[in-house]
Image (tube, grey):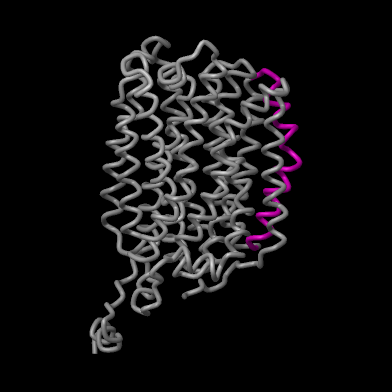
Amino acid sequence: MSDDLAVLVAAPPNTKPLARNQSPAKVIRAAVVGTVVEYYDFGIFGYMATTMAALFFVSGNPTASLLGTFATFAVAFFIRIPGGIFFGHIGDKYGRKTSLSWTILLMVAATAGMGLLPTYYTLGAWATAILVLGRCVQGLAAGGEVGGANAMVAESAPARWRGTQTSMVNTGTYFGSLCASLMALAITSFFDEQTILDWVWRIPFLLSVVLGGIGIWIRSQLEDTPEFEKLENSGEKQEVPIRELISTSGGTLVKIIFLGAMITAGYYIGSVYTATYLKTTVGHSSQVAFLSTAVALLLGIITLPLSGWASDTWGRKPVLFTGSAAGIVLGLPMFMMMSGGSVWQAIVGQSTLFICVSVVNGASFVTYAELLKTSVRYSGIALGNNTTVTLLGGTAPFIATFLISATGNPLAPAGHYVLAAALTFGAVFFIEETKGIALKSL
């Protein structure tokens, strides 16, 4: 009897045979490319913050305009929680592939729409309102992206290399942000400020159509994971996954929220905010600020898979402890270094902060996946991660800008970074080691 016929004979009534396993490389490629697109789209707004402030938040006070832009940046993060619940529901009930196809489509539509939007000088307050609405749609899409992409890769990876392969997903978030940073650097390097304000600012937003089309096509070639198909055939799928998550895995969800403190606040302090900090507080040019951010992101991309490999070799908890402890110790000294005024100090300070975040990030999402069962894995990663991102990540640029304005101390943002690292460090004590375990099936 052939293998295919054996599967059909053995399958219970009203179930479908499991699809042949697709290669982990194919799954990783689809997850990473899609995540690159999503985080390019989501990050370009932050890297263009000073330009967007001048075009959509017109005020006689530059600080007030920048705060308005960062407030809009933060609004999208509050939408990420309902986005994570919504797309988590789709992913846990109808499949990872279905949900991830919609997240990328929504993100591309919102970003391209921003690129076509008239500015405040043409449309007045309506332009600002529509921009905020577009940012909310971006937040809805982003809320479902990382949870689904990590769940899909974790469920497709062999246990021995699960940490390494899952860490690759987040190279996509970094690379997307790196592309956004390099795009901002190219614009400020080749065009004068007035030309950028006139029309060039639209280019990075409209480029999303090209990048998004590639990502959508690659994801359309995927099948769902073996773990999800087992769940589907078992009849144990939940009607309301979020309800099952809270009732059976509420404690795990809380642990994920605290574990994610450093990789959310640290990420946005160390990349998006620092690009602005180096310009407005330290006094560097846009080129230096974006160069420093690009170097930090590139080193983060290199660090992530090394961290994932280390978690496969020595365990998740040792890696999480190491990265968060380094963040606690180095947070303030690295902000002092960045404030020194030289280019090398800016690059070394920012890169060190970001490497600490990347060490933690490389072991985080595989840990989340291993703590949760298949029926709520997408929802659990999405809700846990998005809650932390909303509370500590999306608000980080706004809080950091406000802290400097309120205290007059250019080192004040270091407190936010160190607090986030300390929360992660403490949370690691409350989780079990999950290296090498079989994923919880139901």
Percent x, y for residue 137? 37, 40
The structure residue drawn at horizontal position 39% and vertical position 25%, both measured from the top left corner, is 128
Judge whether 11 appears above or below 396 on screen: below
Query: What span is in magenta?
Result: 315-342
Determine if the magenta segment contains residue 48: no
Judge whether 170 appears above or below 20 on screen: above
Determine if the magenta segment contains residue 320: yes
Viewer-nearest residue: 150 or 120: 120
- Which quadrant of the view contains residue 344? top right
Percent x, y for residue 434? 61, 67
The structure residue drawn at horizontal position 66% and vertical position 64%, both measured from the top left corner, is 431
The structure residue drawn at horizontal position 26% and vertical position 42%, both measured from the top left corner, is 213
9 left or right of 347 in image: left
Viewer-nearest residue: 341 or 241: 241
66 left or right of 7 in image: right
Percent x, y for residue 410? 70, 23
- Which quadrant of the view contains residue 420? top right
Judge whether 11 appears above or below 393 on screen: below
- Which quadrant of the view contains residue 349? top right
329 left or right of 64 in image: right
